Image (cartoon, helix red, strand yellow):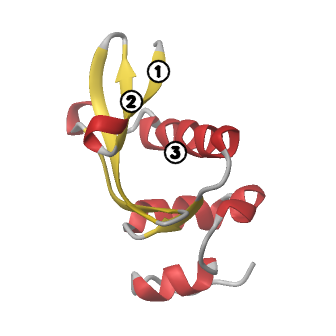
Amino acid sequence: MSTEVIHNTDQNRYEIWLDGEKVGHADYSRMPGQMHLVHTEVDPAHQGKQLAGILMQGLVDDVRATGGIKLVPVCSYTVMWLKRHEEQHDLLGVDIDEAVAACRLPKTGH
């Protein structure tokens, strides 16, 4: 299984490719100094392969390498992924518990 995460700036999204086939993406909108992560999806035929997590890791790695941008998770998957990955919290432009509350997800302790 060969995966690749690509930043498609023309469509404001990160895409995950599996063996040469696009199988998912994470859409974002831009605000000054921020990237709002608004939607994430993986083709149902490829779910259960941890592709969404690989996509998110590639996205945060790219944002970290580029610098100057803070992430604002909006969709429930990005909120929960970032909540579980405290090592990425320095990239957040909003408190993670505020993002959880905005998604109406159950609040849990750190």
Q: Is there a contact, CB below 8 Å, between mark 2 and mark 1?
A: yes
Spatial separation of the CA atoms under disc 1 and disc 3:
12 Å
**Residue positioned 61% across, 72% down in the render:** 93
In the rendered structure, which amino acid carries the disc numbered 2? Ile
**Residue positioned 37% across, 19% down in the render:** 18
| Residue 88 percent across, percent down from the top left | 71, 57
Closer to the camera in the image, 35 or 109: 35
Viewed as shown, does residue 11 lie left or right of 89?
A: left
Quadrant in which the C terminus is drawn:
bottom right
Residue 4: mark: 1
Quarter holding residue 86? bottom right
What residue is shown with label 3? 56
Few, some or many residues within 10 Å of mark 3 (<14, 14–19, 20+): many
Query: Sequence order check: which comes first, mark 1 or mark 3?
Result: 1
| Residue 43 percent across, percent down from the top left | 23, 36
Q: Secondary structure at mark 3?
A: helix
What residue is shown with label 2? 16
